[in-house]
Image (tube, helix red, strand yellow):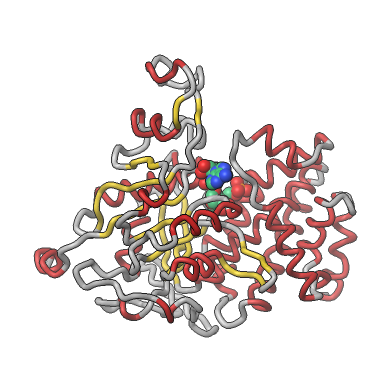
Amino acid sequence: MAGKSLAAHSRKHKVAVIGSGNWGTTIAKVIAENTKEHGDIFEPEVHMWVFEEEYSIPKDSKHASSELASGKQKLTHLINSLHENFKYLPGIALPHNVVATPDIAEAAKGATILIFNLPHQFIARACQNLQGKIVPYARGISCIKGVEVSDEGCELFSDSIGQKLGIYCGALSGANIANEIALEKFSETTVAYDPPAMDSQNPTPQGSPKSSSTDLPKLVFEDKPAPTKQKSHIQPLPSEFPPLHHKNMKKLFHRPYFHVRMVSDVAGVSLGGALKNIVALAAGFVDGLGWGDNAKAAVMRVGIMESVRFGKTFFADSVRTETFTEESCGVADLITSCSGGRNFRCAKMSVQEGKPIAEIEERELNGQKLQGTSTAYEVHSFLVKQGMERDFPLFTAVWSILEDKNRPEDIPHLLEPATAEKE
Ligand SMILES: NC(=O)C1=CN([C@@H]2O[C@H](COP(=O)(O)OP(=O)(O)OC[C@H]3O[C@@H](n4cnc5c(N)ncnc54)[C@H](O)[C@@H]3O)[C@@H](O)[C@H]2O)C=CC1
Ligand SMILES: O=C(CO)COP(=O)(O)O
């Protein structure tokens, strides 16, 4: 059987990771472990695009005695020589088949699978630099937690990447604090992938409303299957390549310490990750006030309700409530992010110290980026255009606190209409 499938598929998938931050580097590690393990499907080498910068190996690093520790070096040179991303994922050994590449087109050259993993403010430029330079039948996965808001509306990054590059793009999101996964502590994630039927050379649940995960009972969703806007312009994957159905996609991400559930609700998976960052700020605000776990739970409850409402209102055709309530990308990500995420931690410190959150971000994160603050502004501007900001009191409250129009102490009052209406 294995011999038959090798003969049928003379080429293997080349994988590139676009981004090399805290999560970008972690996912490159996960993928590189899998490409080595599944050599019948993937080329082992994984190119990771690094936005080049210079960095010095810290004095407390185990590589402090290396000859490269004498001064600033190019980050790509450090990663390729010592197999560690000292700036964004310090202390974690990377597999040697992760190759850091400073030229984005070079990193993506020949890749049939592109993994987008950058802070969302840098994606548009990255796509511009990739246009016309990628394999036309490539497939993408967006690991970005954010939404793209423009005059035309609110768009998922999976859709906007797909449209800019003329490829199909799914999404990966979950309760995934990168440092924990890099240390190989157990976690789960959700991968939404609903590619054109033309990729389905073997029968799998393409476009199926059911989860394809085998380790849990199948869930029966009442909502409609998720259509995607991206399918019209997509080129078929040549038959020399192994098919990219759920089973093979899962092999790219699943590790003993990183369990993957495959679904088809790309919009639900993308929105869960983007919107929980706003909720995590609110959780940080109330925790910073010392209000305790009940206050945080209240904020989280309203936050998940508003996330589902946002999806159902603006992406009605495709979003399933169950994606938020049953998958890692929904309530589980909300819980982990409101416990130990960067947005939560920085918002808490900002209240405790009475300092703007941007100042805390700069001081605490060594170049890593908060996504909740920009997402709160983007979502707010979109809601205002729709005349619906009052329908999302928590999202609006977070924007209002960031803008200094309200104080964290006002949160209960700002949420009151929503709670009262429901009861
Ligand atoms: N860090 C985490 O625990 C998790 C993050 N995410 C999401 O993954 C996405 C990527 O986040 P991280 O990898 O953590 O990034 P990060 O927060 O570590 O940001 C640093 C990244 O930004 C890049 N960068 C800085 N300036 C740039 C510029 N001018 N142009 C292009 N790139 C530039 C750096 O090269 C580096 O790759 C975000 O949407 C985030 O919400 C999702 C799950 C977990
Ligand atoms: O998305 C995350 C965990 O799933 C990380 O959240 P932060 O960006 O707030 O650290």
Counting from the top left corner in percent of width and height, residue 73 is at 45, 26
Quadrant containing the C terminus in the rendered view = bottom right
Counting from the top left corner in percent of width and height, residue 228 is at 49, 78
Counting from the top left corner in percent of width and height, residue 206 is at 37, 77
Would you say 288 lies left or right of 72 here? right
User: Along the line of sight, which residue is nearer the eye, 118 or 143?
Assistant: 118
Residue at 83% over, 43% down: 289
Counting from the top left corner in percent of width and height, residue 230 is at 47, 76
User: Along the line of sight, which residue is nearer the eye, 109 or 48?
Assistant: 109
Q: Is residue 359 shown above or below 49?
A: above
Residue at 32% over, 39% down: 95
Quadrant containing the N terminus in the rendered view = bottom left
Residue furthest to the front: 132
User: Along the line of sight, which residue is nearer the eye, 302 or 35?
Assistant: 35
Decide if residue 22 is in sight here.
no
Residue at 40% over, 63% down: 132
Would you say 24 lies left or right of 320 here? left
Decide if residue 107 is in sight here.
yes
Would you say 263 lies left or right of 312 here? left
Residue at 58% over, 59% down: 273
Number of dots carrying numbers: 0
Would you say 5 lies left or right of 258 here? left
Query: Residue 114 occupies which quadrant of the picture?
Result: bottom left
Q: Is residue 80 shown above or below 241?
A: above
Query: Residue 263 occupies which quadrant of the picture?
Result: bottom left
